[in-house]
Amino acid sequence: MTFTDLNLIQPLLKAISDQGYTTPTPVQAQAIPSILEGRDMLAGAQTGTGKTAGFTLPLLQLLNEKKGGKPHRKIRALILTPTRELAAQVGESVKLYGKYLPLKSAVIFGGVGINPQITMLRNGIDILIATPGRLLDHVSQGTVDLSAVDVFVLDEADRMLDMGFIRDIRRVITILPKIRQNLMFSATYSDEIKTLANTLLRNPAEVEVARRNTSSELVKQSVILVDCKRKSALLGELIGKNQWEQVLVFTRTKHGANKLTEYFQKIGITASAIHGNKSQAARTKALDDFKQSRVRVLVATDIAARGIDIDALPHVVNFELPNIAEDYVHRIGRTGRAGCEGEALSLVCVDEADYLRGIEKLINKKLESRIIEGYEPDPSIKAEPIQRGRGGSGGGGNRGGGADRGTKTGHKRDGGRHEPKKYPSDGRRR
Ligand code: AMP
């Protein structure tokens, strides 16, 4: 199958060929025809499957067909994303694929000045890409007009709910015109997602590419068993010895991300951290430096890394396993993208045995584990609940309280297990 078989118009085909894409990915092949027919859609597809082009291309075509010579442009497509990074990336894709069409787009998110956004909105745009909070700021200030929205896209809906955006989403929906096309993308399906889909979508076409809650088959996954306190040294050695040039490393907490970044810098491996406590400018710079290979290691927390799109990222390392098993699927979705093979390595200490079991249950697969000579786990170390203090990320890791956002609606990102607890009476810290 080629893109021409999907009945896309010439200006889009030219933009696609400029990108060097020849064959639609499975999600594109399935989603594009239904979206062009005007149907609602529920798509189970994680980042890395080509889903952004899967909805952007038909969306651009629909808007281009329906342009009705109105004197003033009004927003006809609204794309909601959970994070700023994802909004920026989707915005880039819209610009890239729409470069030969006379459509205007804008990206709005929080953490940056609102006035330039107001000017952009006032000048008239066709496609708005936004995060929920800032969009609602504009709604309450009366600086955005959503009365002409024909197509509404909810990207990474599962992460939206995980970040506590459900009420914001519902508010946005009530503002939109009743008759519209709705497209919802989610990497995983929970009961909450199904409920949202039932209220949002009418007779949706269903597209499922990465099977429900399964990890990408292109990703080679493995586990190294190692004591918490030795993880930093082991990872530094693995990066150096194997000459890994672009490694995305996940920690559970912002504090852990900072500590590990400092450790790498100290041993001469260029690294930056990306997490919710960094300013938008710092986050953009860190991501850009990593993409341009100015730094070898990007250390990220789950939510900051959501949707990060880096072509053919070869290595993802779970420095600490996520406390929500589904985050594992999202994390490793950063590698093995669009046909490239990738490797996802998890460093697992004795405390994380339950997390590992939860992940294996979710992905329905036992992960191969090994031990590295010189880094054998000390069998005398007994598992302790993961809690403040015993930081694998260079000591003092704030394991319980540092996750970016995520508890807004009381959703237990930590499964409720990580209330700060007292150390054992021997005060043992490893
Ligand atoms: P996404 O799942 O939208 O984050 O896209 C993942 C990556 O796949 C992006 O880097 C895209 O540029 C790339 N991509 C999208 N469509 C194709 C295609 N048809 N062929 C090759 N690469 C693609």
Image (cartoon, rainbow, N blue to C red):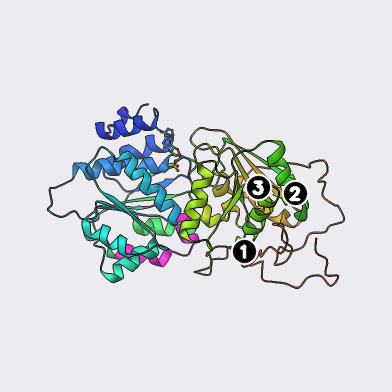
Q: Secondary structure at mark 2?
A: helix
Asked whether the beta carbons under mark 1 and mark 3 sit within 8 Å of each other, the answer is no
**What residue sits 49% from the left and 47% below the top?**
288
- For the residue pair 412 and 387, the one nearer the viewer reads as 387
- Left or right, 284 with respect to 414, comes to left
**Mark drawn on residue 360:** 3
- Left or right, 176 with respect to 339, comes to left
Residue 429 x, y percent position in the rendering: 80, 64
Q: Badge 3: how crowded within 10 Å, few (<14), some, or many (20+)?
A: some
Residue 157 x, y percent position in the rendering: 43, 55
| Amino acid type shown at disc 2 | Ala
Q: Badge 1: how crowded within 10 Å, few (<14), some, or many (20+)?
A: few
Q: Is residue 17 magenta?
A: no
| Amino acid type shown at disc 3 | Glu
Identify the residue under disc 2: 233
- For the residue pair 243 and 364, the one nearer the viewer reads as 243
Report the span colored magenta: 154-174
From the image, give the main secondary structure of the stretch colored magenta: helix
Ranked by sequence position, the earlier of labels 3 and 2 is 2
| Amino acid type shown at disc 1 | Gly
Q: Secondary structure at mark 1?
A: loop
- Distance Cα–Cα, label 1 vs label 3: 17 Å
Identify the residue under disc 1: 415
- Ligand 1, by image quadrant, is top left
**What residue sits 69% from the left and 36% below the top?**
242
- Left or right, 170 with respect to 126, comes to right
